[in-house]
Amino acid sequence: MFKLHARSAPTVRLKVTGTAEQIRRGEAIAASFCGGCHAPNGALTGGRDIAQELPLPIGSFVSSNLTSAGLSGWSDGDIFRAIRYGVDRDGRWLIIMSYTNAGKLSDQDLWAVIAYLRSLRPDGEPTPDPPDHLNLLGIMMLGAGMLPTGKPVSAGVVTAPPRAPTSDYGEYLVSYLDCRECHGAMLTGGTPGQLAPLGPDLSLVKTWRFEDFVLTLRTGVDPYGHQLGKQMPWQPISRLDDDELRAIYEYLAGLPNM
C-alpha cells in the first residue's frame, strides 16, 4: 500500500499558447501515439480497459477521456504533469501512464499535444475517478516487487533533435513510442515475464528495404506475408509521415549487432 501511494511529482505551472502549428503537431502525435490507448473508437474519448491486454488479472486501467469532457477542471500544467510524470492533478499515481514512455516527449511536443487536446470539442463520458485500480493480486505483486513502480520522475527539460529523416530523430521517436516495452531494452526482443506483450527482435529490419518497412507498418503485414499480432499498435504508428518512418528505419537499421 505504501508503494501504491509513493509516487510524487512537482506541480507544473504552465499555459500553452495554442498556435495553429502547435495544434497540427499535437494532432499528429495524438494520432500516431496517444490514440493507441485513448481512441478505441477513433476519438480521444478513452474508455478502453488496458488490463485486458495484460497477461495477469491485476486490476482495471481505463484510458482517460482526453477531450474537455474528461479533462474538465484540469489546467495545462495538470495535463503536462500527467503525461510527463504519470501523476494526476490530485497527486495520484497514473499506473499505466507511468509505465509508458510518454514522459520522453520533448517539452515542445508535449505542449503541442496539450494545445491539440484543448482544441477538441467535449465528447464521450467522464473519465472514471480514479482511472487505474489494482486489485488484491495487483497490490500483493506490487508490494512483492513483481510489478514495476513506473519510470523515474525527472524534472529536467526534455529536448528533441531536429525533425528530419535521420537516425537521431528516429531514436527520439522510438524513445517515446514504447517500442522497448515490448521489444526489449536493446530492441532485441522481449523477455518472458515482462508485463507488456512479447515483441520480436527488431534487428530483422536490417534485412528489409525501406519500402518493406513502410508497407509493413502501413498494412500490418510483413514482407513474408505474416500478419502483425493484434497487440502490435501498427495502426497508430502507420499514421507517422514518411520522413518519420524513414527516421525510425534508419535508427533500427543502424543498431549494432548483438
Image (cartoon, rainbow, N blue to C red):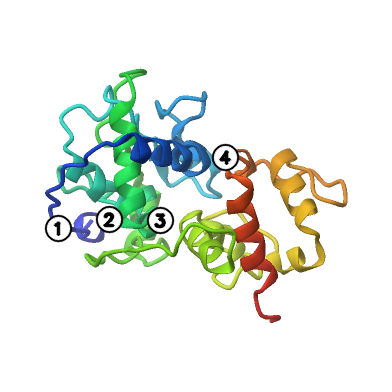
Amino acid, disc 1:
Pro
- Using the image as rendered, state which of residue 34 and residue 51 is in the foreground: 34
Q: The N terminus is located in which quarter?
A: bottom left
Element under disc 2 = helix
Q: Does the rendering let one see residue 95?
A: no
Specify which label sits upstream in the sequence, 1 or 2: 1
For the residues carrying marks 4 and 3, which lies nearer the camera in this image? 4
Check if mark 1's residue and mark 2's residue have beta carbons within 8 Å.
yes
The CA distance from mark 4 to mark 1 is 31 Å
Reading the image, the residue beneath label 1 is 10
- In the displayed structure, 188 sits above or below 106; it is below
Residue shown at the point (29%, 46%) measured from the top left? 111
Q: Are marks 3 and 1 in contact (CB under 8 Å)?
A: no
User: Which sits earlier in the primary sequence, circle 4 or circle 1?
Assistant: 1
Identify which residue is drawn at 55% across, 43% down. Answer: 53
**Percent position of residue 22, x then y:** 34, 40
First of labels 3, 2 by sequence position: 2
Q: Residue at x 35, y 41 (%)?
A: 113
Q: Circle 3 sits on which residue? A: 99
